[in-house]
Amino acid sequence: MNGISLLAALKAFDATARLGSMTQAAKQLGLQQPTVSAHVLRLEQEFEVELFHRRGRRLELSGFGCLLLEQTRRVFSGEEDAQALLLAARQHYVGRLQIHAIGPYNVLPILKHYRLRMPNVNLSVAVADSQTIISRILDWRGDVGIVLGAPVDPQLFRMPLRKQALVVFCHKHHPLAAKTAITMKDLAGQGLVSREEGSTTRRVFEQTLRKHQVTMRTVLEMGSREAVREAVAQGFGIGVVAQPAYIADERLVQLPLADATMHTEVHVVCRQERSQVPLIQAFIEAARLFSTDTKRIQDTGSDPCKAGLM
């Protein structure tokens, strides 16, 4: 297999692995489906490897296929980045940016800035937890992420975006709801609606409980902040979410803490080697503008948008 045919075969494999379908891969590559199938089969036969487990019409990546996909993503993502760079040099700024975020409240204000600079870029936003987002960025399944905490992986570029307080809240008929403020000791023995294991919000809250030597009873463990809110609204226990994720609800009451403060830090992340790609670099700059605006509002107590200055 010469260099040109090997490259074509690897492209066919890469597209099939990413899209999970030879038909979809053929559409993306502008080829016929039998051609894509032949490319993949030739790779397997030439190098005596199994790239996919074939289960009827379904394709599942083999262990070796996963390893090969990591390499082809490095190769072809670089090719895609080079194309984006060339397009940017011509001031066309077209393409697609895949964004993965912990919630819409952190990403949408950034996109307002981004659209001013990159109006022709197709934007895709997926919401997930921080661990999933980091995994997707590292696996080349996303361009940029917005996560809680500061990931330490050396493969990642990261930029602080904002700090956000954690809010403790309960149902309006909960015994603590009548208090104007509570102490950490008031939470002892109370039922807790918790986020799943690995959640940054959960980790920070549990650290605060340990610091104050307080133990709560976990009555429910939920997979999203929306689920936590609804469970608390239905009377299952006390919940904790980041301030931007707390939505006013007549069934809920916030519980200000008199003796503790809790916050998490939000970061923008991408792969180190992609931080200078024009579409990603523009997002980082938009995030920096949003971060500056947010800090100014926090420091001065005024919103320039509401003041008619923007």
Image (spheres, rainbow, N blue to C red):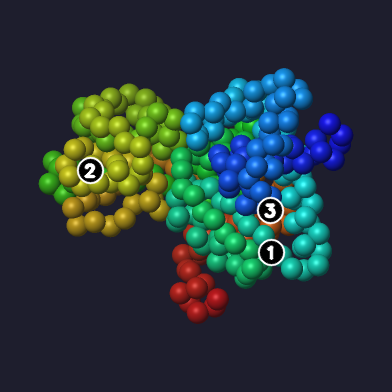
Which label's residue is closer to the chain start, 3 or 1? 3
Residue at the spot x=28%, y=57% of the render?
A: 248
Residue at the spot x=69%, y=36% of the render?
A: 38
Q: Quadrant of residue 89?
A: bottom right
Circle 1 SS class: loop
Residue under label 1, please give it. 94
Distance between the alpha carbons at the discs numbered 2 and 1: 44 Å
Query: What percent of the width, then of the height, locates residue 305?
Result: 50, 73
Image quadrant for the C terminus? bottom right
Would you place residue 83 above or below residue 54 in this image? below
- From the viewer's side, name the closer residue of 151 and 126: 126
Does the CB distance between marks 2 and 1 fall below 8 Å? no
**Number of residues whose C-alpha sits closer than 10 Å to that of mark 2, classed few (under 14), some (14–19) or many (20 or more):** many
Query: What percent of the width, then of the height, locates residue 68?
Result: 69, 29
Checking the image for residue 232, the label placed there is 2
Which label's residue is closer to the chain start, 2 or 1? 1
Checking the image for residue 30, the label placed there is 3
Residue at the spot x=33%, y=41% of the render?
A: 240
Residue type, numbered disc 2: Val
Residue type, numbered disc 1: Val
- From the viewer's side, name the closer residue of 83 and 310: 83
Query: What percent of the width, then of the height, locates residue 138?
Result: 63, 36
Mark whose residue sits in front, 2 or 3: 3
Q: Quadrant of residue 140?
A: top right
Residue type, numbered disc 3: Gly
